[in-house]
Every structure is written in structure tokens, then in C-alpha cells.
Amino acid sequence: MKKSVYSICGMCAVRCPLKVEVENGRVTWVEGNSHDGGMGTSICAKGGASIPFQYDNERPQSPMIRVGNRGSGEWKKVSWEEAYDYIVDKLKDVIGQHGAHSIMLTDRGGPFADLRKAFMKAIGSPNYINHDCTCGRNPNHASKSVFGMGRTDFSYDLKNAKHIILFGRNITEAFKVKEVKSFMQAVKNGAHITYVDPRVTNTAGKATRYWRIKPGTDYALLLGITNYIVNNKFYDEDFVSRWVIGLSQLQDFLQPYTPEWAEAETEIPAEEIKAFCHEINNDRPKVIFHIGWHLARYRDSFYASRMLNILNALMGNIEETGGLIYPKTPKDAGSPGLKSLGADIPVVKEQRCDSCDTTYNHFDSGAGMLQLAYQAIDTGEPYPVKAYIAHRHNPLIALPDPEEQKRILSKLDLLVSVDVNYSETAWFADVILPESTYLERDSILRTEKGPKPGFGMRRKCVEPFYDSKPGWQIYTDLAKRLGKGQYLPYETIEEIWKYQLQDTSVKIEDFDTKGFVKLCDDPIACQPSSIKFGTKSGKIEFVNSTLEEKGVLSFKPYDRPADPPEGSYRLLFGRKGYQAHGQSTNNPVLSELLGSNKLWINTVEAKKMGVANGDTVELTNGDARGTIEARVTDFIHPGAVFMLHGFGQNIPLLTRSYGRGLADQAFMKGKLRGWDQAGGGLALNECFVTVKPVA
Ligand SMILES: Nc1nc2c(c(=O)[nH]1)N[C@H]1C(S)=C(S)[C@@H](COP(=O)(O)OP(=O)(O)OC[C@H]3O[C@@H](n4cnc5c(=O)[nH]c(N)nc54)[C@H](O)[C@@H]3O)O[C@H]1N2
Ligand SMILES: Nc1nc2c(c(=O)[nH]1)N[C@H]1C(S)=C(S)[C@@H](COP(=O)(O)OP(=O)(O)OC[C@H]3O[C@@H](n4cnc5c(=O)[nH]c(N)nc54)[C@H](O)[C@@H]3O)O[C@H]1N2
Ligand code: SF4
Ligand SMILES: [Mo]
């Protein structure tokens, strides 16, 4: 029997809408949900690789309880009942001894996190945290500091832009399907593309201007650009006088930072900086400065990202075609939104373990900061954290310095990993709960913002191949066993969907025809006349007095990054189009495409060391050491080396990824404590490694 099912891809965190073909209980084809205009039938290689992944016998096939030492890989296969009993006994002990706040949960954020947040609220812990301290924290806080609105409160109208500026935003390889299609439309339309990266990427190949910046000096380049734009009044004067607070303070601050000064810091010629500024002056307001992410990995990234936000404001591009557009919400379409699963659960009033509601209350506490939660596990301050559930999150790869993390995680009474893979974190856990893959499960409904706002549904396409369960069931089961079933009283996914939809006029069957429901027929147009900002003043705050009261400067003087010592290089990292972080390297198909990672070394530097392309080199930082194949290339700055993230995995059961390549995070010694104090993001790129040929 054949059927088509609408789903939402789960092979990376982008979560594209899909149509899945099923024949006799097996998935035969996956493509984009073409009812979604931005998507068409396109998907990426990772999405396609979900079919072999579903039957992969190298993923967890039932719940497992650790029997040997942590990380030893000695497991006992157990039933779900046994696994639940084990977890619930431990959680009850932790609650009895320390209180519910001593339990934390981290996940990958996003539209389905509402269920996990509700679960944490139900059990009475404030410690829901997501992955964002290694992803978008700095740009998000920078956006809030300027507009009073977060990173995702704006969307980029790339396809209609005349000029797109990407600082290390490798948009054609580290992509989102809809975003890259919109970007490629801009390229076809003849838009200017300025790409800034110490490394030549595919995106550099699409650009009209490529700047090989000295690593870590983006803030200097941005100061030079903004200086020239402000001094020459290359900005939208009407927009700025209507909306901006602090232009004259910005102008005073910028005076030392001329394009000539920026050239000396960044190695980008002043004349080119000026030519660029003239170009964007002609192209505005259809100019988009993309605010991140990977520029967000330095100790001054908050300020670099702040300057990108300031430049967007100077372009007057807010709520303009080809600029930064407010993604429209159900409310904009005159409809109530989905009801949050936590809406009827009492608010947890206790202090957070990561101090995001106290010392760091200028940070967005919704996402928290995992590096500070680690400190709570380590020190017992502000209180002991003894149980940790990592759901769809692999901190031993995602955060730096896995050895230091393991030292800290060993202090827990319980570490549970809910995953579809044996992640490094799962391998180090006490219990692994295998979640059904996205093809095998329903999920809670999600809100879809955009010109036609609405809701999206992921439906189960086929029955689980192994003994796995969907996340919604795992958390409702656990809540019941912890005596909190009244807060998550659902027996079926339909009951959850009905709860979510109760304030709206939408019915479950309305999702049948397209997999999503739109709340209006025509796209909601940009409305420049209805611009609003979330700051205290209601304006765009170049000077942000709320932050200044917290000791966070609005304008930070430039502080030159340290150069790597002789024989050392700054370690850069990134991803490829057919890879999602560390989760693709053992995929039956993607592993073949990915092979092993290599170390990009600049040709001149390699020559100095006597290293030829394909040679093996040794990489060290402190006691982190390993060998890797050299990829000698002109396409990287001489002060840096680069490797793909997600390799160097250490799980013998995973025969396709075991021992392949090196793990970038293992070389980031001590970096669990190295973060941008103004923005909250971990400074992953502030790491030097020594490279030597292997004799
Ligand atoms: N295929 C694929 N797509 C993805 C993901 C994935 O895993 N796989 N992940 C998604 C996620 S979660 C994210 S956050 C995004 C990440 O999207 P990006 O941030 O665009 O992704 P990266 O591949 O990490 O690229 C970072 C780039 O920053 C450059 N860089 C390093 N140092 C500097 C510097 O000092 N200045 C400048 N200007 N550039 C620098 C690096 O050389 C690298 O090319 O991608 C998303 N899309
Ligand atoms: N050194 C270094 N560190 C980095 C980065 C880097 O480039 N270099 N990138 C940073 C960025 S931008 C990000 S966003 C983070 C990402 O870090 P993570 O969020 O940890 O990475 P992911 O690969 O997205 O997935 C996490 C886990 O989710 C599991 N998973 C996948 N699908 C499912 C599912 O359907 N259900 C469940 N339960 N689990 C699932 C995967 O198997 C994986 O173990 O890493 C950050 N850390
Ligand atoms: S980008 Fe690819 S892997 Fe990620 S959700 Fe979309 S189709 Fe799936
Ligand atoms: Mo990310």
C-alpha cells in the first residue's frame, strides 16, 4: 500500500517541511513539501540520508543502562519500564535530597522545545537550558541590545536584496534550504555579495567581493566601515532621526577608527573599504548585514555583532523589501497562537542554576547558559545540580574541552541522554533513551512565522523500526511516574494537538491537505509605518542605558587579538553541506561522502614547515594531541588552520566514524571558561594549536 505523509525533517535543526512517500510500511522517498513555496521539492543530502539512517543497526535499538564505568561502553539492554524505573528512582532521590531545582535539562531549542519546557515546569525545576551558548547567544543579545528584539525576531528578505554582507556566514554550505534558495535567487538577480572570511568557502565563490580578513579582527573592520558611513552620512537620515538614540555618541566613539586604521588591523585595504561603503550607500535600503553566527565565536563578538545590527539600522532596512522583515505571527493574521503546553502549569519561582535570572539577568534566561550550569555542577554553587537530561543535544561535541566536561559530568548522580544516535554524551551517560527518528514519530505542533503565518505538523510516516519512543511519550510517561501527570495528562498526540489548538479555529484534520495550516490567504506585506522596537525607549538604542547600568558598555574600544605564537595557528572550524555537526559522520551514506576531516594549512606556512599536500601533521594544544592529513591550500589565511567540526569520534560501536579524523573541540583546552562576558557566547575560536610535520 502506498501513501504520502507530510512531515518535518529532523536530520538537522533547520527542520524543513517535507513530503514522505511510504510503500508497504517503508519509506521510499523524501522531498520538500512543495505546498511551501520557499521550499519547492528541494531537500539536502542530509534529509535524503534519513532513509538509510532509519534502518541503521549502529543506532541505539532499545533503552540502555550503564553497567561499567562511565564511558566504558558497557551497557545492559533494558525495557522501557526498567529504564523509567531507574531514572525515576534517581530523580526522586535527587528531589528528596536537594530539591527539584537540582535537575536540569538541555536540548537543541527550536519549535518543539515547548514540551520539554513544560516537563521541567511540571517537575518544578527552573533549569531548562538550550544549546545556544555555542550558537547564537552573542548575536541574539547584540540584537536585543540594539532593537530590544532577538535574532529571530527579524527575517532576511535575501532574494530581493541588492547587497548581502556575510561575515563568516557560509550560507551555501552551512545552510537552511529555504534561505539558500532565497540567497541564490539574489545571486541570479545580480545582487552584490560581500563575503568576509579568513578562508575561501563555496559562498566566497558566489560573492562579488571576497575579503580574506585576518582572523578575529571583524570588529575592527566593522568599526572602519561604520566610521566611513557615519562621517559621510551614507545612512538613511530620515529613518535614523526618527528612530535612533545615540548617533552622536556613536560618531564620537568612531573617530579614531578610520578605514586606514582598519586596514592595519584587518589586512583589508582602506580603499576597498571605502569603495564598499559607496556601493552600499547606493544599494540601501535593500542592504542586509547578516549578524551571525560564526563571527560570534570571539571574545568581542557581542560588539562586532552589535555593530552589524547598528549598520542594519543605518541602512534604514527595517520592514523594507530586500531588508530585515518582521516574520509575521498568528497574531498579525488576527488569530490566537498555539497554547503553550506549560500554560496551565504553575510558574517555578526558584533561582536558576546558571544565574541568568540574577547576576546575568541582562541575558535572555529562556535559553540559559550551559557553561554556567556546568560550574554549578562542579562547585555546588548556587546550589548542587545532580541530575541532567540531555535531549537531542551532544555537549561533549558541542561545547569545548570534553575532558574537562567529563570531569564535571562525573559529579552527577544521573546523566540521561535522549538521542537517536550513540552520541559521545550518550556513551558517557547512565541511561540512553532512544527516541524514534523523525520518520517514525509525531511531534507537537509548531508555529510557523512568515508572510503567511500558521502552524505546522510532523506526522509519523512509519512504525519505529527498533524499540524506540517519540519524545512526547517519553516526557508524559516520566511526568506521570514522578507524580506530575496532572500537568501533562496526555495519552495520545491528538490530545496534545487539541490542547495546543484550543484557542484557535484550526482543527487537526485541517493539516491533512498540506501538512500545515496558514492563517491568512494573502501574504502580509511589509508595513514600514507600523515599525515597533522592544527597547525600553521604543527606539533603536545605539546607546543602551539598561546595559550600561549593568556595566556593559554601549561602545567598546577596540582591543587587538593576540597573534598566535611562532609555530602556532588559530584553530578555525566549520561544516559542510552534507554534514550536521557531529551527527552525520556515522550515517551509512553521509559517512562515505565525508570521509575524514583534514587540516587546511596555508601554502606558504606549509612550505616553511616542509609539509606537502596529503602529508600527516601533528596537532597539539596542551595535552591534546593528534595526527591529521594536511590539506595545503592558498585558500586560508596564513595565521590560521581549519578543520571540519564533528569528527574524531571515539565510540567503537560506530564503525564508520570511530577514530576518523580529529575533534576540533578536544583542542579547545580551558575554553569552557572562555566566553564573551558581554554577550554570553563561548569563544570557541580563541584557540591556538601547534602544527608539526610527522617525521
Ligand atoms: N550543512 C549544515 N548546515 C547547517 C548546520 C550544519 O551542521 N550543517 N548547522 C546550522 C547551524 S546550528 C548554524 S549555527 C549555522 C552556522 O552557519 P555558519 O556560521 O555560516 O557555519 P560555519 O560552517 O561554522 O562557518 C563559519 C565560518 O566562519 C569562518 N570564520 C572563522 N573565523 C572567522 C573570523 O575571524 N572572521 C570571519 N569573518 N569569519 C571567520 C570560518 O572560516 C567558517 O568558514 O549553520 C546551520 N546550517
Ligand atoms: N567545536 C565546535 N563546537 C561547536 C560548533 C562547531 O562548529 N565547532 N558548532 C556549534 C553550533 S552552531 C551548534 S548549533 C551546536 C550543535 O550542537 P548539538 O545541538 O549538540 O548538535 P546536533 O548535531 O544538532 O545534535 C545533537 C544530538 O541530537 C541528536 N539527534 C538528532 N536527531 C534527533 C532526534 O530526532 N531526536 C533526538 N532525541 N536526538 C536527535 C544527534 O544524534 C546528536 O547527538 O554545536 C556548537 N558547538
Ligand atoms: S536542511 Fe536538510 S537536513 Fe536540515 S532540515 Fe532541511 S532537508 Fe533536513
Ligand atoms: Mo548553531
Image (cartoon, rainbow, N blue to C red):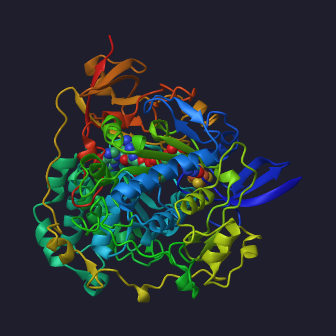
Q: Residue at x 57, y 88 (%)?
A: 334
Side of 253 where 291 appears, left or right: right
Side of 373 where 629 appears, left or right: right
Q: Is residue 437 above or below residue 622?
A: below
Q: Nearer the viewer, residue 366 or 170?
A: 366
Looking at this view, name the residue that lies furthest to the top. 695
Residue 673 position within the rendered picture, expressed as x and y whole percent measured from the top left: 24, 46
Residue 56 position within the rendered picture, expressed as x and y whole percent measured from the top left: 67, 36
Quadrant (top left, top right, bottom left, bottom right) of the C terminus: top left
Q: Residue at x 23, y 49 (%)?
A: 217
Looking at this view, name the residue that lies furthest to the right. 1
Side of 19 where 229 appears, left or right: left
The image shows a total of numbered marks equal to: 0
Side of 627 where 638 appears, left or right: left
Q: Is residue 17 among the parts visible in the rendering?
A: yes
Q: Residue at x 71, y 54 (%)?
A: 31
Q: Nearer the viewer, residue 440 or 185?
A: 440
| Rendering quarter of residue 260 | bottom left
Q: Is residue 580 among the parts visible in the rendering?
A: no
Q: Residue at x 60, y 30 (%)?
A: 592
| Rendering quarter of residue 97 | bottom left
Residue 349 position within the rendered picture, expressed as x and y whole percent measured from the top left: 34, 73
Q: Is residue 528 above or below residue 57?
A: below
Residue 587 position within the rendered picture, expressed as x and y whole percent measured from the top left: 60, 36
